[in-house]
Amino acid sequence: MKGLRNFARILILFPALAVSCASFADSDAGETVTKRGNIDDDYYSAGGVVDIDAVVAGDVIVAGGELYIGHLIEGDVIAAGGTLKIRGEIKDDIRASGGDLNIDAIIGDDLAAAGGSITLSPGVTVGGDAWLAGGEVHIAGTILGNLKVTGGDIRLSGTVHGDVELEGGEIQILDSARIDGELTYKSPRQATTGADAVISGGITHQPVDWDYADRGYGLVFSITLMVAAVLFYLFFPHYTLVSVKRIGSDPWSSLGLGFIFVVATPLVAFILMLIVLGLWVGLSMLALYCVALLSGFLIACFFVAERGARLIKQDISSRGRRLISVIVVIFVLGLIQMIPFLGGLILFLLLLLGLGAGLIQLRYVYRPAESGS
């Protein structure tokens, strides 16, 4: 039940994914992406370093290692990466995930963020509600709505005009904090509250055993899969689509090959590792095995997205629609896997299908080079 509640929160945080962004009118990708000036529609980007300092009339959807987003965004910001710095004015929602998030922006509506470290600077204003999950979370800005935080170390020094719900290992309410509503928190110990902190509503403390691994990381992992799906399709669009078709045209072969690969590869790798000369070969095989599993699962997600779109008679032929649909599928599959036994079985079968189809398709990818040699 705890996992189901956590994933239900994810679905609440990301409802716009199912309906936003009909297509991406402007997009870039590369090792380093820099965007300036005016963009009259949605903007989509992925890269090692992405620096957006522009006026964007629509949404911004971006993934990469280092992300810098700012100036004026008329729509939503959906971002995931290693390091994120968001500044300027975002007139709608922000949904972000990463290792290190630093937000210094005026946000017109809601904020949902997950990461290793999350910092809301004193200049932040969130027009709606805020949901945050991270290892370290520091809120120094102003939240006009309600605030919900899950984190290992939580520090609140800003202003919240609504209610505050906190769940963490260490909770500090600093002197400059102001809460107009009620404060409810779950923690192994009482929160440290500054003498000058203002809490207008009541204070409720529920002592709990704290295990962050069962709370914040579910959200981070789901969004990490989202980033992987975006990048995978961006760099291998043709391979992704033909592998998806392979599942539909030859599901049993895909399922069988996927099963053989899952069972046999670790066994062969461990046998090689027992041989001194085969140690590095075995380790390399295990590394490739992990990459193959991830690729196979992502291919399966694209397959489910395509079949789901057919079922509800939606066109996802554009890159934007396809990516948004697969993001929705990832979150839905996350909910399905919470079903005892059946959920895990469904995901395992999808993994085998995608893995097998991807391996079969590799043969066709390299066939021209082999025939020409």
Image (spheres, rainbow, N blue to C red):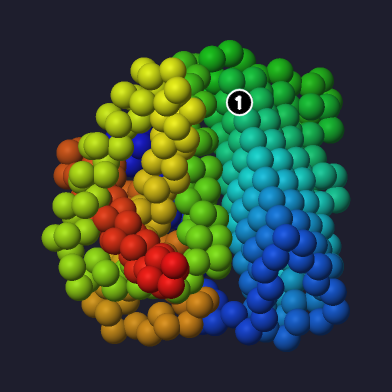
Q: Which residue sits furthest top?
A: 189
Q: Which residue sits furthest front?
A: 373
Q: Secondary structure at mark 1?
A: strand
Q: Could you say which quadrant of the image residue 91 lies in?
A: bottom right
Q: Visible in this render: residue 8?
A: no
Within 10 Å of disc 1 (Cα), the crowding (few <14, some 14-19, many 20+) is: many
Nearest the viewer among 256 and 224 is 256
Nearest the viewer among 277 and 50 is 277
Q: Is residue 271 left or right of residue 292?
A: left
Quarter of the picture containing the C terminus is bottom left
Q: Is residue 41 left or right of residue 105?
A: left
Question: What x and y, as percent, mark residue 133?
Answer: 58, 39
Q: Could you say which quadrant of the image residue 342 lies in?
A: top left
Residue at 31% x, 53% y is 355
Residue at 66% x, 76% y is 27
Q: Which residue carries the number 1 mark?
A: 152
Nearest the viewer among 294 and 168 is 294
Q: Is residue 83 left or right of residue 334?
A: right
Relative to 363, does residue 113 appear above or below in the rendering? above
Question: What x and y, as percent, mark residue 65?
Answer: 69, 50
Question: What x and y, as percent, mark residue 273?
Answer: 39, 22
Quarter of the picture containing the N terminus is top left
Q: Visible in this render: residue 172?
A: yes
Relative to 118, does residue 136 appear above or below in the rendering? above
Residue at 85% x, 79% y is 37
Task: Tell me the kind of residue under disc 1.
Answer: Gly
Residue at 45% x, 62% y is 327
Q: Could you tell me how many numbered marks the image carries?
A: 1
Relative to 171, does residue 313 appear above or below in the rendering? below
Question: What x and y, as percent, mark residue 149?
Answer: 59, 38
Relative to 345, does residue 138 appear above or below in the rendering? above
